[in-house]
Image (cartoon, rainbow, N blue to C red):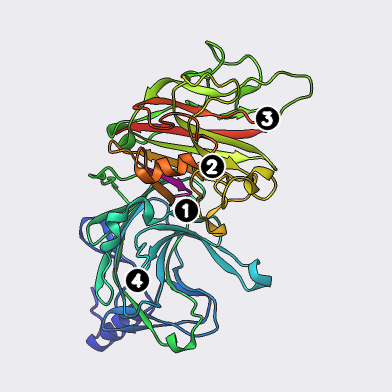
Amino acid sequence: MRKLPLMLVSLLMLWIGSCGPATVETKEGWTNLFDGETLNGWKQLDGEAQFTIEDGAIVGTAVANTPNTFLVTEKEFKDFILELEIKVEHESSNSGVMVRGQYDPAARDGKGRVFGYQVETDPKERAWSGGVYDEARRGWLYPLTLNPDARSAFKLGEYNTYRIEFIGNELKTWVNGQEVAYVVDDMDATGFIGLQVHSIRDSTDAGRRTLFKNIRIKTEDLKATPMESDIYVVSTIPNILTAHEKDRGWKLLFDGNSNKGWRGTKQEGFPEAGWSVRDGMLIIEAAQEGTPRPGDLITEDRYSAFDLSFDFRLTEGANSGVKYFVTLSDGNVGSALGLEYQVLDDERHPDAKQGIDGNRTLASLYDLITAPKEPRFVQPIGEWNKGRVIAYPNNKVEHYLNGVKVLEYERGSEAYRKLVAGSKYKNLENFGEAEEGYILLQDHSDEVHYRNIKIRKL
């Protein structure tokens, strides 16, 4: 066999190195997405932040008056385990990693827009690094109010190791070995990996840098890493539980197919009309003239300390509620009494303007404590919102809306009893202080949809 001259071989190797792919196979099935020297295999989308290479790292430098900028892989990925290191040099440099990222070239009047799942890098006081944000679409899927212990994992000014697993419809994240987020969602099955440099409002922050290195991915022979803690799972898949949730004692209160586990407050069985099960939803129908109302639904079982989650979808102007510690011992002829997580169209239902300082608005402890809410954390009427109530064994109670904690209180405390004394419940002895009670879905004559109702005893 004829040998090539040494100089020709050297030139050929240089040519291969300059135009070859950025992905390099490594041991144990990992592939390097960044070769440490070039941006081969990557392309820039949306904004005009600068991406350069320095000491084996991709350096993203903020530029004023430009949208969020993304450096994304030319290749798309389905199921994978991704690892990389990220360093943020200044707290103004919010960043993130797009996973199964999407791109709409027609958005922003033809300027294009990146959207989809983003694993957050949040160096400010909020500290939601590792949380999951749905960029330019649904907003926060997993804010770190759901996992406050993980807020200390990220270190400003240091390299932080991110591990992201997206296998099937389960997205899990770790920061520096700390379990951070667990999302179950099936909106996007494949997409690119992207590195973000966030837009900046203050021109004095121009030139701030975010660095990425040791970016590697594994796409074959994947084995999901089980979460070891009692991490809360956010699922948008109707009426299922993950293996993790089952292992941690979660139970479905509604299976999506039947009315099993529920009955009317004023009858032994499930109401014959008014409440229905269809398309994976438990629905209270709107009132019809001349038709008797079915009344509220309650669980067959009673609960003391618990973690309760539920999805709800309001129709325009609708009112309902999720009550807990309902005893049915009050003899009330109307809706059964209990502590109530208000479910309401705040803009269109008059009840939002009743009570004191908004304590009858969405997610509030009805007539007792107002739930302050930022509009961006509330999905519009006709879209699904996620409610959550945690009642701890020590009588502390928390309300959440779409993953954000909106209020907390302690049943039986002096402050709580003072609130009751100034409310519509003032003449009820020990209101809301029962050791256990039913979970209730309220019939308020409006159409409201429920699903993903699950509970764990604490």
Amino acid marked by disc 3 = Ser
Instruction: Indicate the quadrant where residue 212 lies.
Output: bottom left
Is residue 323 or residue 262 the one in the foreground?
323
Instruction: Indicate the quadrant where residue 343 lies.
Output: top right
Q: Secondary structure at mark 2?
A: loop
Residue labelled with disc 2: 367
Amino acid marked by disc 2 = Asp
Pick whichever of labels 4 and 3 is earlier in the sequence: 4
Cα distance in 3D space between marks 4 and 1 = 28 Å
Cα distance in 3D space between marks 2 and 1 = 46 Å
Pick whichever of labels 2 and 3 is earlier in the sequence: 2
Pick whichever of labels 2 and 1 is earlier in the sequence: 1
Q: Quadrant of the N terminus?
A: bottom left
Crowd around label 1: few <14 · some 14–19 · many ≥20 (10 Å): some
Residue at 70% of width from left, 47% of height from top? 348
Cα distance in 3D space between marks 1 and 3 = 42 Å
Residue at 37% of width from left, 68% of height from top? 122
Note whether 106 is above or below 320 in the view shown. below
Mark 4 and mark 2 in contact? Answer it, CB < 8 Å: no
Give the side of residue 350 with respect to residue 17, left or right: right
Residue labelled with disc 3: 445
Please report the bounds of the magenta region as a residue range. 397-404
Q: How many marks?
A: 4
Note whether 126 is above or below 382 in the view shown. below
Pick whichever of labels 4 and 2 is earlier in the sequence: 4
Q: What x and y, as percent, mark residue 335?
A: 58, 26
Residue labelled with disc 4: 123
Amino acid marked by disc 4 = Pro
Q: Residue furthest right?
A: 289
Crowd around label 4: few <14 · some 14–19 · many ≥20 (10 Å): many
Residue labelled with disc 1: 190
Pick whichever of labels 1 and 3 is earlier in the sequence: 1
